[in-house]
């Protein structure tokens, strides 16, 4: 992360930036796609009981969303500072990547203070899945990849590009919009826990995700920037409610010793599936300012939701089976 930020901040060559983006940690979305995410998820699940697992992941998502929202709010600050000192806007944008790299030192400090037990929790035996778990995890992985592929058409970077092209909104204003959407999304994670207690994890994922996708279609069809941004913020209330529930579900339907492997198998394909769509989305926005990428994203996600409900409505985690 440190190397990524410094390299992006100092590099001018497009080819070099592409290479850095491929082999390092730069992520066009606000979520975490690092190779360390599966270990974090399995570690968290191991430290609580089944009835507290979803709540823990909701707090985990809440913290990440809030801090990410603050980052979005500050995204335009380096440009403002650069203008104040009469530097070019490009200098401010490059400085933002330097700040990203420097944040890596904060993570280094945080990780170094984990307990010895936490550092040694994963082992080679965690890489194996039973035949029953393998069938479940592979099917979930395929569905999650479809969801991620759709999300790749509407990452924050692609959405920002569409807004710039269609409405000419400034980076500073868009940062405020992302801050508002991220903030409401953060607190919606807590609501997802209560909903899951009443209708189950799978139904919570589906019944909150589909309305969010419908709102994204309405964003693409909005007649002006204010309606579009209002709908986008409203979508934030629902769009991330499935995140803690999805993670909790994966951790619940496999044995504790299989959690690290299950998290890896479901997360890595998601990252790969989201990698190519931004290329197609960028081409679409070069051809037209209409929000085709947003609509394609919504259609893919609705398809994922319907398939998930059909295939896993009867695969219940232990806490639901015993209730």
Image: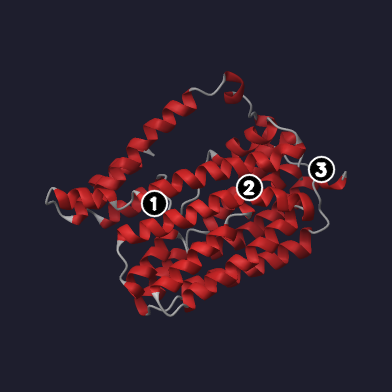
Q: CA distance from mark 2 to mark 1?
A: 21 Å
Which of discs 3 and 2 lies nearer the camera? The answer is 2
Is residue 85 at least partly visible in the picture? yes
Callout 1: 10 Å neighbours few (<14), some, many (20+)? many
The quadrant in which the C terminus is found is: top right
- Write down the residue under mark 2: 190
Tag 1 secondary structure: helix
Residue with the mark numbered 1: 72
Residue at the spot x=35%, y=51% of the render?
19
Secondary-structure class at tag 3: helix
67 on left or right of 133: left
Asked if residue 63 is positioned above or below residue 224 in the image, the reply reads above
Q: Determine which of the numbered discs, if any, sits on residue 319 in the image.
A: 3
Instruction: Name the residue: 61% across, 21% down.
Output: 117
Out of 174 and 246, give the one closest to the viewer: 174
Q: How far across and how far down the image is residue 244, in percent? A: 63, 47
Residue at left 75%, top 63%? Answer: 309
Question: Quick one: label 2, few (<14), some, or many (20+) residues within 10 Å?
Answer: many
């Amino acid at each position: 992360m440190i190397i990524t930020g410094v390299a992006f901040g100092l590099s001018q060559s497009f080819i070099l930036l592409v290479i850095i983006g491929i082999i390092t940690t730069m992520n066009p979305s606000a979520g975490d796609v690092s190779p360390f995410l599966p270990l974090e998820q399995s570690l968290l699940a191991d430290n609580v009981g089944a009835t507290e697992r979803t709540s823990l992941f909701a707090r985990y998502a809440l913290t990440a969303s809030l801090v990410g929202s603050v980052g979005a709010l500050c995204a335009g600050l380096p440009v403002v500072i650069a203008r104040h000192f009469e530097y070019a806007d490009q200098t401010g944008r490059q400085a933002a990547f330097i700040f990203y790299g420097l944040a890596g030192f904060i993570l280094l400090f945080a990780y170094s203070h984990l307990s010895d037990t936490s550092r040694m929790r994963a082992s080679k035996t965690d890489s194996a899945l039973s035949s029953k778990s393998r069938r479940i995890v592979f099917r979930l992985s395929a569905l999650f990849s479809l969801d991620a592929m759709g999300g790749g058409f509407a990452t924050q970077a692609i959405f920002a590009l569409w807004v710039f092209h269609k409405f000419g909104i400034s980076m500073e204003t868009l940062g405020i919009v992302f801050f508002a959407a991220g903030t409401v999304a953060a607190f919606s994670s807590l609501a997802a826990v209560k909903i899951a207690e009443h209708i189950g994890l799978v139904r919570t994922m589906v019944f909150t995700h589909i309305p969010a996708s419908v709102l994204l279609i309405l964003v693409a069809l909005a007649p002006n920037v204010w309606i579009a941004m209002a709908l986008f913020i409203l979508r934030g209330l629902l769009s991330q409610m499935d995140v803690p529930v999805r993670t909790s579900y994966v951790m619940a339907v496999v044995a504790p010793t299989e959690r690290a492997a299950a998290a890896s198998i479901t997360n890595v394909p998601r990252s790969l599936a989201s990698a190519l769509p931004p290329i197609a989305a960028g081409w679409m926005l070069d051809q037209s300012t209409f929000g085709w990428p947003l609509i394609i994203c919504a259609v893919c996600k609705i398809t994922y939701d319907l398939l998930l409900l059909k295939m896993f409505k009867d695969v219940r985690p232990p806490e639901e089976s015993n209730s």
